[in-house]
Image (tube, rainbow, N blue to C red):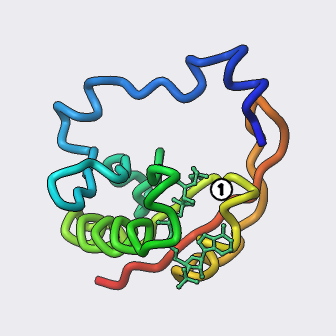
Amino acid sequence: MYRAQLEAHPDAIELPAEQITAGLVRVAEQDGVVVGFAVLLAPSGGACELDGLFVEPEAMRGGVGRLLIEDAKSIARERGATRIDVVANPQALAFYEAVGFKPAGEARTRFGPAPRMTLAVGR
Ligand SMILES: CC(C)(COP(=O)(O)OP(=O)(O)OC[C@H]1O[C@@H](n2cnc3c(N)ncnc32)[C@H](O)[C@@H]1OP(=O)(O)O)[C@@H](O)C(=O)NCCC(=O)NCCS
């Protein structure tokens, strides 16, 4: 959906190496092969922001995204957050709804408005 914009502005999805060294990145592996990853920022105001979630195209619809969200929920809880917030790619809305996220307004991104969603993680 954002291919043209992202090709023109690759910095928009650049992943800072510091997120890895800070322990904010989780990788999903299947038979020793990386099939996806999630970036969950440190809690702020009770929420951990899900800053990135990608599954390799050939592994999509195999439950990897759901597992990464379940994992992110435990991490958010351990870190004292009560919810996970995300600015959703509109094409990923059905996924976020399927794994329990609820609509939470709209965010402004450099590429236009995008839905904000939130997931309670309990305590
Ligand atoms: C969004 C994304 C992370 C989902 O990961 P995934 O591993 O394919 O998701 P799962 O297999 O765990 O899907 C869980 C459920 O979500 C729903 N779902 C997932 N993808 C869907 C789609 N394209 N259309 C409709 N429902 C979808 C389904 O209910 C699915 O369960 P089912 O397969 O049993 O029907 C993956 O498609 C992706 O990396 N997309 C490109 C990057 C992106 O948009 N990331 C989000 C940034 S905000």
Residue at 44 percent across and 66 percent down: it is 65
Residue occupying the point 48% across, 55% down: 58
Q: Disc 1, ligand 1: is the CB inside 8 Å?
A: yes
The answer to which of 62 and 16 lies nearer the viewer is: 62
Q: Is residue 40 visible?
A: no
Q: In which quadrant is the N terminus drawn? A: top right
Quadrant assignment for ligand 1: bottom right
Q: Report helix, strand or loop for mark 1.
A: loop
Query: Could you tell me how many numbered marks the image carries?
Result: 1
- Image quarter hosting the C terminus: bottom left
Q: Is residue 112 left or right of residue 33?
A: right
Residue type at tag 1: Ala
Residue at image location 54% in from the left, 29% down from the top:
13
Q: Which residue is mark 1?
A: 88
User: Residue at the spot x=44%, y=57% of the render?
Assistant: 45
Left or right of 56? Residue 107 is: right
Q: Position of residue 113 (x, y in %)?
A: 83, 45
Q: Is residue 96 above or below residue 44?
A: below
In screen coordinates, is 102 left or right of 61? right
Q: Position of residue 122 (x, y in %)?
A: 35, 84
Q: Position of residue 25 (x, y in %)?
A: 27, 45
The answer to whether any part of residue 23 appears in the image is yes
Measured from the top left, where is residue 75 in percent x and y? 24, 65
Instruction: Using the image as rendered, state which of residue 91 and residue 58 is in the foreground.
Output: 58
Identify whether 31 is placed above or below 41: below
Circle 1: is it few (<14), some (14-19), or many (20+) Cα within 10 Å?
Answer: many
Residue sitting at the far right: 112
